[in-house]
Amino acid sequence: MTFIFLGDIVGKGGRSAVKTLLPDLRREFNAQFVVVNGENSAAGSGITLNCARELLEVADAVTLGDHTWDQKGFENEIHLCDRIIRPANYSVTQPGRGYGIFQNPAGGEVAVIALQGKVFMRDSAYCPFETVEKILAELPSRVKTVIVDFHAEATSEKIAMGYFLEGKVTAVLGTHTHAQTADAAILPGGTAYMTDAGMCGGARSVLGREVESVLKKFRSGMPVRLPVVESGDIRVDGAAVTYDHTTGKALKIVPFSRIVKL
C-alpha cells in the first residue's frame, strides 16, 4: 500500500493547491491514505475548524505543530474533529489529541502521531522521545502502520528521531522548516525517513511569505507585516511512501514537488 504525506500547508493558496492536486497525486501513486500538515493553513499561521474540514475533503488526517493555537477559538473547536492531530508532547491539560488510529479505506489501520521538537522551538513541550515511546507502547498490536510527523527546527533532532524510531514505525517525516530536504531514505530497519517534507505554498516566496516584505524585514530589522503568497505558482511538496501493511515496514519513499497555477 501507499500513503502520501504533504509538508506544511501555508494559507488559502496552499489549501487551494492541495485540494486541486491531491486527487491527481492519489491516482499517480495509487495512494490509499493521505496525511497533511495544516498548522499554517489559516492565513499562514495556525488553523481553524473550517480550514481543517476543507483539507479533510481530500485528506484523511491533519497534523499540527507549534502554531496549533495561533487562531483564536481553535482550542474550543479542535474537539469537533477527531481527524486533527496536535503535537502529542504538549501538556495533557491542552485540548485535542496527539495521535489517532484511522481505518485505511483499502484495509487495515493506520496510526498517525504528531510530535514537536524542543531544540530552537519557541514553545515548551515535553520530551518527544519519551512521549512517542509511551504512545507506541499504548498502540494495539494489530496496528502495524505508524506515521510520525516530527515538527522540529533542528536537523540533528529530526535525524536522531529517525534513528530512535528505526524499525518501530513505518515513517518519520519532518515538517516545520518549509524547505524540502534531499535525504529521503528507507532506513535498514524498514522505516521511511525524510528530514523535512517541504511546504505547500508560494513558489516565489520565503517560506510562503511575500519575498519583498521578508527582505525589507531582514534589511531594516524593523517589524514588517509579512503577507502570505496566495496566488500565482503554488508549490506542493511531499512524499509518497509504499509499505507492507502486514508488517508496517516501508519499502519505498518517493519525494515530489509540483507546481499548481492559481
Image: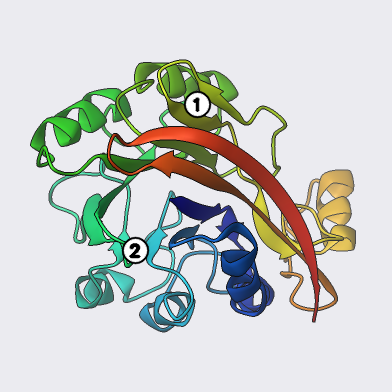
- In screen coordinates, is 246 left or right of 69? left
- The numbered dot on residue 158 is 1
Residue 79, percent from left and from top: 19, 72
Q: Against 56, is 144 above or below? A: above
Q: Is residue 149 visible?
A: no
Residue 124, percent from left and from top: 34, 36
Q: How crowded is mark 2: few (under 14 residues within 10 Å), some or many (20 or more)?
A: few
Give the residue type that dot 2 points to: Ala
Which type of secondary structure does the marked residue at label 2 adopt? loop
Q: Against 149, is 206 above or below? A: below
Q: Residues within 10 Å of mark 1 (few under 14, many from 20)?
A: many
Residue on which the image places disc 2:
106
Residue 259, percent from left and from top: 80, 65
Residue pictured at 60% horizontal, 57% vertical = 29
Q: For residue 139, which quarter of the picture? A: top left
Q: Which of marks 1 and 2 is nearer the N terminus?
A: 2
**Circle nearer the viewer, 1 or 2:** 2
Q: Against 91, is 42 above or below? A: below
